[in-house]
Amino acid sequence: MPLPSKFYKYRSMDTASVQYVESTVLKNELYFAKSSQFNDPFDLSPVFSFEGSFEERVADFVRLLEKFEPGLMDQAKRQAYAEERVRLALDDGRIDSTTEQMMSFHRQEVADKTGVYCVSTTPSNILMWAHYGDSHRGICLEFDGMLGYDHTPLQVRYSQKREPVRMYKKSAEDLFKVFCTKSNHWSYEEEWRLIRPVYEGGPGVVHFSPNRLTGIVIGAMASPETVRTVFNWAEQRAPQINVYKAALSKSQFAVEISDACELGR
């Protein structure tokens, strides 16, 4: 589907967080987190399906040998060794426990070396403000649809069931399941993600183009200090950004966003 025109990142402005938010606003830095820092224990933690023919299992075993032990044996020996191991050690009675243990370890290693930056498509979600915007006391950063990173943002898919990754018939769709599938309990987040694999640097700080940050929304319950800080940041940025103010609706259980008045007006 087409990219949204804007993305939003809810942030707290408490003492522990404000320096990192300032780095985003004034230094154009995004922090890509690893899965162990997520609040959802199911995130980047797939289940596996081991359905496959003898030939598919052998081919996958050969692939692993070539990847992790490239100089151990020649091609013919790798093929013979893989057939023997699959026939004797990885038969239907033992393949689940043996392979799942190995893949769980490998999955955790890969997930911890992959950086993820999560954003939403809405600046007015009450729960997002409560959970990630310090109970409406924080802010919400507004980016344009590309965020200035090398890769296209991916939309998170929400599901009631944990769809397994097919070990012997893996595809791009299976990789998408690992990085971009969450429980439908989280659907209110309207989440998209940027993925930074280990070969591109993994978790850590990434710089974005200054013109990709287009605005800051001040939370409805933000303190005067937070308001002053946001306007101070806005004055220092080039190019200029918009400053908005969230307010609690008087007629609905909703957050309304409007342009913020300048300080002193």
Image (tube, rainbow, N blue to C red):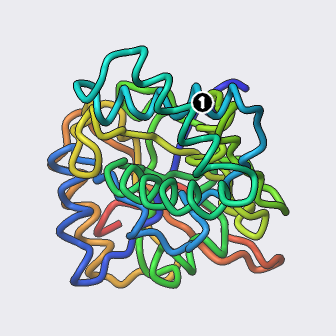
Q: Is residue 217 visible in the rendered structure shown here?
A: no
Question: Which of these two is toward me, 198 or 6?
Answer: 198
Task: State the residue in front, 145 or 258.
Answer: 145
* 54 lies left or right of 152: right
Residue type of the residue flagged with mark 1: Val
Kindly tell me whether residue 25 is visible in this rendering. Answer: yes
Task: Where is residue 207? Give x, y as percent.
Answer: 21, 38
Residue nearest the viewer, comparing 78 with 14: 78
Position of the C terminus, as image quadrant, is: bottom left
Q: Residue at x 76, y 36 (%)?
A: 52
Left or right: where 71 falls relative to 213? left
185 w.r.t. 35: above or below: below
Residue at 65% of width from left, 75% of height from top?
127
Name the residue at 47% across, 64% down. Answer: 10
Is residue 205 toward the left or the right of residue 155 in the image? left
- Mark 1 sits on what residue? 58
Q: Quadrant of the N terminus?
A: top right
Q: Nearer the viewer, residue 47 or 22?
A: 47
Where residue 112 sits in the image (x, y, percent)?
Answer: 35, 57
Q: Residue at x 66, y 74 (%)?
A: 126
Instruction: Specify few, some or many for label 1: CA neighbours under 10 Å numbering under 14, 14-19, or 20 or more.
Output: many
> How many marks on residues?
1
Q: Is residue 208 left or right of residue 178?
A: left
Tell me where residue 129 appears, x and y as whole percent.
Answer: 56, 73
Image spot of residue 79 (x, y percent)? 49, 22
Label 1: which secondary element: helix
Q: With respect to residue 197, does 163 lie above or below?
A: below
